[in-house]
Amino acid sequence: MTIIDDLKKHEGHIGKGKKHDLERLHKHLSIVLTILGSGRHRVAYIDPKNPGMVLKVPKSFRHFKDSISEVWQYQRQQAKGPGGHRRLAKCELATIWGVPCVLMERVSYVKPDDKLPDWAVLIDQREVGYDKDGNLVAFDYA
Ligand SMILES: Nc1ncnc2c1ncn2[C@@H]1O[C@H](COP(=O)(O)OP(=O)(O)OP(=O)(O)O)[C@@H](O)[C@H]1O
Ligand SMILES: [Mg+2]
């Protein structure tokens, strides 16, 4: 069992509006996992023993909805089948201490001189990378 599987099983629950509890969750995650990156609204963690997956955890209650939105967009893409205008990195919802988080495949980042299709160039901050099969995917589409 991975550390993330273990975290999902934990019974702890963060009360709505309990900012201190959310900070405690981040403190705990920064100890048991490794921080991969941090955006405006989420911190991305990895388990070094399972480095192919990224756990994205909201920094504030206002951004809990980002997790729902990202996973919903991915599921909608899957339901539509291939042929959409862009590809989204595979992800699923992971509830940790009652907080909706996103468990996403880890991508390898594009290089500055990589030739990108129009849809990718238009993505804010070029948050696209390659999945394990080498497909170009967006990794921040909350
Ligand atoms: N699937 C992934 N693969 C590799 N790195 C990732 C992935 N998802 C997130 N990251 C890293 O974690 C950082 C923060 O994640 P993300 O951009 O999703 O957070 P955010 O707070 O929504 O960002 P923003 O500030 O752009 O709104 C990213 O900039 C990137 O470095
Ligand atoms: Mg981002």
Image: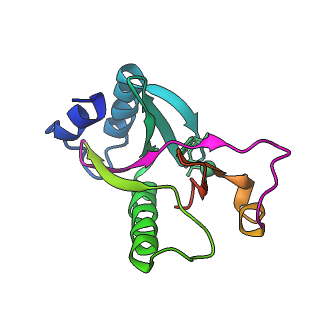
Q: Quadrant of residue 76?
A: bottom left
Q: Is residue 130 magenta?
A: no
Q: Which residue occupies 13% across, 39% down?
A: 11
Q: Is residue 103 magenta?
A: yes
Q: Quadrant of residue 111?
A: top right
Residue 6: x and y, percent? 21, 32
Residue sitting nearer the eye, 99 or 19:
99
Q: Residue at x 40, y 62 (%)?
A: 71
- Is residue 14 found left or right of 134 in the rendered image? left
Q: Residue at x 57, y 38 (%)?
A: 38
Residue drawn 40% across and 53% down? 61
Of 21 and 101, the residue lying toward us: 101
Quarter of the image where the N terminus is located: top left
Residue projecting furthest to the top: 31
Q: Is residue 33 left or right of residue 14?
A: right
Which x, y percent locates residue 103? 39, 47
Furthest toward the left, the residue is 11
Counting from the top left corner in percent of width and height, residue 104 is at 44, 48
Q: Which residues are magenta?
A: 97-117
